[in-house]
Image: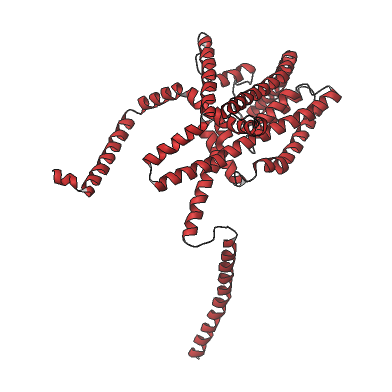
Amino acid sequence: MFKLFQNKKHVLMAFYGFIVLAALVLATVVLLNVHSVLSLFEAALSLLSPVIYGLILAYFCNALMKKFERYIFGFIRSRKLRRIASISATYLAILLFIALLLLMIIPQIVSNIDRLTAALTDLFNQAASLFNEKFVELQVRFGFTSGFRLTFKTLTDFLASFGGADDSLASLPLTLLESVATIFLSLFFSTCVLYHKESISLGMKKLLALVLPHKGYRAVLKASRLTDRTFGRFFIGQIFDAMIVGVVMFLILGAIHLFTGEMRYYAVISVICAVTNVIPYFGPFIGGIPSAIIVLTDSLPMAIVFVLVVLIVQQIDGNIICPAIIGQAVGMSSLWVIIAITVTSELLGPIGMFIGVPLFSLFYAAVKFLVERRLEKKGLPTESAAYEHVIRSSNEAMQAEEPANNTAEPSNDAHAEEGKE
């Protein structure tokens, strides 16, 4: 028995067999207790949510912190003091930005909430009355009866059917307390990650070098750089682009309100357009339609002007601003972008609409990297334009063969007729 285990080949086979058997047993246990496993996974995610949120916050704050550290506090010789000053300035800038948004939005909402609510209610009643009238005409035309009538109550009942059945407010204080605790813990973890990011990165590389072979270690590092370059650059670029769009919309709509006095909710609308602009292609429609309805409560001409402003700003953003900021970070066609948003929104909900394109572009870049690497090993060109000549040559060859076959067939028939004569 001991001689058996002295053979390295037998030991390796036994090890792989044990791994496969353990994986099969684990998969069987998971499938038989899938609900318990999912509940345990949800509990673990809830417990680790401050850490996860802190890591995400640190990742997106890192770019701004590096700018502060390099250009603003570069004169500080002490690395620790420079890092502390940069982290503090980063969070202060974010808090000031959020406070500025709230100062712009809240006064408009508070001062016009009654008027806006009344106007939206009146607009809904007009639309419901028109819908009920047309619905009755359809009943008369097609000979059926229905007691359905569109009212505000039927709409609220329909929307409530998508939510939970428990509308009690008894757990509201506890929920607010948990939310506040999660926010502070997330800020704490993100601060620790930003301060120790170099040592954390070196520790992760050391661990990967321990458990992975050299090729696997290099592949993981390349994948992490690709992820940062594709996902991070796109998402941060989209946020910066959305901020520019929000500022431009705020200035234009604010000027219209200054001269006409009818675009009352220009700050709220600018924030809505900026937030939804992070979603490619669909974002302007998602933010523009409800904003146009809000403007419609003032007047129909202002709603038309708003739609024209949105179209002009989106054309400038799509053709000039966005390509200058993001560049070729995604590298996907419009069709793949639409597919990415559709699939990820179905899987992840509203969050999928925001992160779907960078996630899909990461997969797209990985597949492109593997394909080009395989082509290089075969000695073939990696540029797509190089294969246009090959396709054109093959098409020309096929077109040249068709006339030759057509001319060859009559000659055979002629020889056959001569033979018969």
Determine the residue positioned at 59% across, 44% down: 330
Say which of 203 and 92 sits in front: 203
Could you tell me if residue 282 is visible in this image? Answer: no
Q: Residue furthest left?
A: 1
Residue 58 visible? The answer is yes
Residue furthest top as drawn = 170
Describe residue 191's horizontal placement relative to residue 106 as left or right. Answer: left
Q: In which quadrant will I find the N terminus?
A: top left
- Residue at 68 percent of width and 43 percent of height: 323
Q: Is residue 123 above or below residue 410?
A: above
Extreme residue toward the right, this view: 259
Left or right: 72 in relation to 177: right
Please determine whether, in this image, residue 235 is positioned above or below residue 161: below
- Which residue is at the front of the view, 331 or 263? 331
Image coordinates of residue 274 in percent, x first then y, are 68, 30
Position of residue 174 measured from the top left corner of the image (x, y, whole percent): 50, 11
Residue 30 shown left or right of residue 218 in the figure: left
Within the image, what quadrant is residue 414 found in? bottom right
Residue 185 placement (x, y as % from top left): 51, 19
Is the residue 53 above or below the residue 392 in the image? above
